[in-house]
Image (cartoon, grey):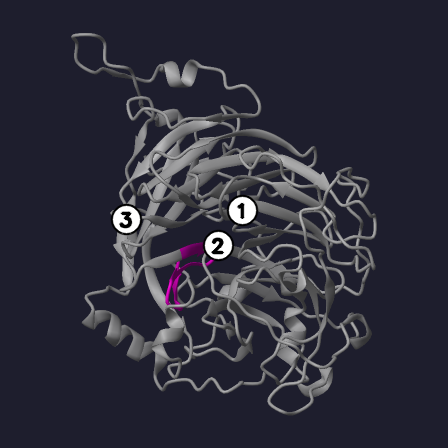
Amino acid sequence: MINNGATAAPSASSSSNTAAQSLGLKNFFKTPEGRYKLQHDKTHPSSLLPYALAKSITQITLAHLKDQAAQSAGNLPALQPSSTYSVASSGVKYVTSKLLGSSGNGSRMLGFVGGNGAGSKANGGASKSGHVGGLSNGGSSTIGSNTSDGKGSYLIFNVGDTLYITELNSEEKDPIKSISFGNSNPVCHAFDSKAKDGHDLLIGLNSGDVYSGSLRLQLQDVGKKLVGAHHYNKDGALNNSRCTSVAWIPERDGAFVAAHADGNLYVYEKGKDGPGDSIFPVIKDQTQFSVAHARSSKSNPIARWHICQGPINAIAFSADGRHLATVGRDGYLRVFDFLNEQLICGGKSYYSALLCCAWSSDGKYILTGGEDDLVQVWSMEDRKVVAWGEGHNSWVSGVAFDSYWSSQTSEDESENAVYRFGSVGQDTQLLLWDLAMDELVVPLRRPPGGSPTYSRTQSSHWDSVVPVGTLQPAPSTKDVPKLAPLMVHRVHSEPLSGVIFSHDSILTASRDGHVKIWTRPGNSDSQVSSSDTCTPVKPVSSGFR
């Protein structure tokens, strides 16, 4: 690997522990299954000016690169003269994934959207795509400038106008690679574990520009510019509002979506680089969901989804790629049948904007968090809120299910399923929760002149059938069961921006670019990369109830 000017401080782990203790932060926290310990602390170079930290909210991506002997240089994008773009950032989102090497270079076309969309007038601007090459620091670079194949586990995170890459298991705090975007800041990024053509990394910018490139190629290049990348919505030609979130579409090789601050979401095919310009009809009603297809089959993006009036703050696909969840400043969660382009259900937060969302691995539940300080649990079967998590003292900025956790006290997965999930907030705290649907106590409405009673029987909120495509108002506090956190721990000194679960650890990140890796009980001496290839387990019966 090439260290691009990022000088590691001596005794990184000991100095970070000393600093944490001086701030009253503990380097461990306890759960019923044991003690989680702080293993590593990652951050941006110490030379970064303070004003740069205020420009963005850090997002982190975890990527695991395996051997790629089968892939030759011919399958990687050619290096060309570099250009640079950047962005001021805002959403928070985390992705856990693994890269599997492949010699294939084909991209399948999406079958669920066509290029024959109708429409009268265009809403202005055409989408353009191109390539970005790799000249940096006044010198030339080649694919062979670094002989390493990139094997290992990496953290990718954005601070200011720079995207940083650091080795997950290294004791060094500072990153090994930095990619500068010049006059604007990277806002969001995502990693594809099954990319067949080497383009596995997505990057969204505040200017609306979107890039797809090869993580392995960035590691092999000695420069500080993005190399060998495809460029979409160049200079915001189609949409110049902030790109708030990007995501690869599961089980759809080469397809991804990019959400924007104006409430629009675009569907792209990364292998499509035809001469046609994407032209979409004018949106007649900003408050209504609508889908429009590009007029030309050669255009990219191939479809525009108008989700809401106002910014889309976060998006998340179910594991099978069938459903898409979005949350926005208007406070609504919306769940779509992505293949059929239909709104299924959704509803309003208790108060103000929603900031984050996440799916359970089995696709049965959705978590949301936002400015009402609550963690909401949505059921796809019931199409409504089934629980509220109360415990944060400020906005909830990140949520995630722990797909690797199990109690290991029962082999029965059909009954009494328990889900472990986590949340982080601007109160600097990490909260862990257990959701056991069969133990939720559903409050009944207060009878006239009487006292409130509680029962496991369903209330009117639960009894009502929600029609498909309905957005519900916020339910009454008397109708939704309350969850108490299993564990509360102050993990950072600054507001948190996200949480991610891996097989051996929990990762927490603060909005100013600090990431902490907490090893699970019994894994303090193990390497995260050695077991990140394990398959997430399904929820099982818990013994901690």
Q: Residue furthest front?
A: 121
Q: Earlier in the sequence, mark 2 or mark 1?
A: 2
Mark 3 touches mark 2? (CB < 8 Å): no
Please provide percent x and percent y for residue 495: 31, 59
Secondary structure, mark 2, is loop
Q: Measured along the vertical axis of the image, is residue 217 above or below residue 530?
A: below
Snapshot quadrant of residue 235? bottom right
Disc 1 crowd rating (10 Å Cα; few below 14, some 14-19, many 20+) is: many
Q: Would residue 109 appear left or right of 206 to someone viewing this image?
A: right
Please provide percent x and percent y for residue 513: 40, 68
The kind of secondary structure the magenta stretch mainly shows is: strand
Please provide percent x and percent y for residue 171: 42, 77
The image's mark for residue 315 is 1
The residues tagged by marks 3 and 2 sit, at their Cα atoms, a distance apart of: 18 Å
Q: Amino acid at mark 2?
A: Lys
Q: Residue furthest bottom?
A: 139
The residues tagged by marks 2 and 1 sit, at their Cα atoms, a distance apart of: 9 Å
Q: Which residues are magenta?
A: 498-520
Residue to which mark 3 is pinned:
394
Closest to the observer, 260 or 393: 260
Q: Amino acid at mark 1?
A: Ile
The residues tagged by marks 1 and 3 sit, at their Cα atoms, a distance apart of: 22 Å
Q: Is residue 504 magenta?
A: yes
Q: Earlier in the sequence, mark 3 or mark 2?
A: 2
Q: Would residue 302 appear left or right of 392 to someone viewing this image?
A: right
Mark 1 touches mark 3? (CB < 8 Å): no
Residue to which mark 2 is pinned:
93
In the image, what residue occupies the spot 54% across and 42% down? 361
